[in-house]
Amino acid sequence: MVIQLFSLALTGRADKALPHRMAAIQPTPLYLARHAETVFNHARRMQGNAAHTPLTRAGILQAEAMGAALARHFAAGPVPRIWASPAGRALQTASVIAEHLGVGFFAITADARLREIEVGDWTGRDYAEIVAQEGEILDHAHRLFRMPIPGGEHYADIATRLQSWLADAGDAPALVVSHGMTARVLRGLLVGGPVYEGVPIAADVPQGTVMRISGGSEEAVHPGDGSTGPRGA
């Protein structure tokens, strides 16, 4: 369906309404899964996109639960094309889900535009170490990183690459395995959310959650039980 995407002007305000920017086609429906828990999540370390951060045992169980729920959901109908961030944690989660759905790993389409927010100078570091050196890095009220991230991305950067992905993905149903921050921006573009630093960002959901988005609204196909907020990204 045709939707209107929000302007990405960098207002720096969380409460300013934005004009519409462009029309785009979105996959309908779009199933959006947040990857399962990793060893970095468990250790409270900043992941970024540089390193492969494998799933924990709890994360594997979360991926299994997502796969089982989606297998039940698609039991009576065709399985949509599966997309994933190229990050190892997203591909590992996607591979478990795909196996439940009878889809081979090499049929998964990895797309860098679905990767997590780039965290620049914070990559690989312990959260407590970063806070001790730089002060509070989280906006706890919104469960988001404060901006700017030294050497990293702005939420508007994520929105720009996601708009590019939406333009290329077309309107066929799709299942996407991505990340906490990226998924919140994508959901904000498609169903709306409070404007933060010039970008609509949807509410946080736990790791292991699968949302179904269609017609400008969303519902949880499978509610996850993992971490929430930036530390679960």
Image (cartoon, rainbow, N blue to C red):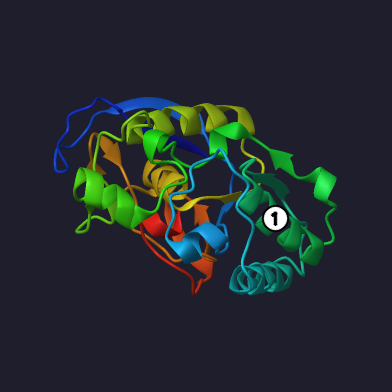
Residue 226 against residue 108 in the figure, above or below: below
Residue 194 visible from this viewpoint: no
Residue 167 lies, in percent from the top left, at 55, 28
Q: Nearer the viewer, residue 71 or 120?
A: 120
* Total count of labels: 1
Q: Is residue 231 above or below residue 67?
A: above
Tell me where residue 116 appears, x and y as whole percent.
49, 42
Give residue 128's quadrant in the image: bottom left
Seen at 85% across and 52% down, the residue is 104
Q: Secondary structure at mark 1?
A: helix
Q: Residue at x 24, y 34 (%)?
A: 198
Query: Would residue 166 be seen by someone viewing this image from the given angle?
Result: yes
Q: Name which residue type carries label 1.
A: Gln
Instruction: Compare residues 86 and 164 and report the one nearer the observer.
Output: 86
Q: Which residue is mark 1?
A: 92
115 above or below 33? above
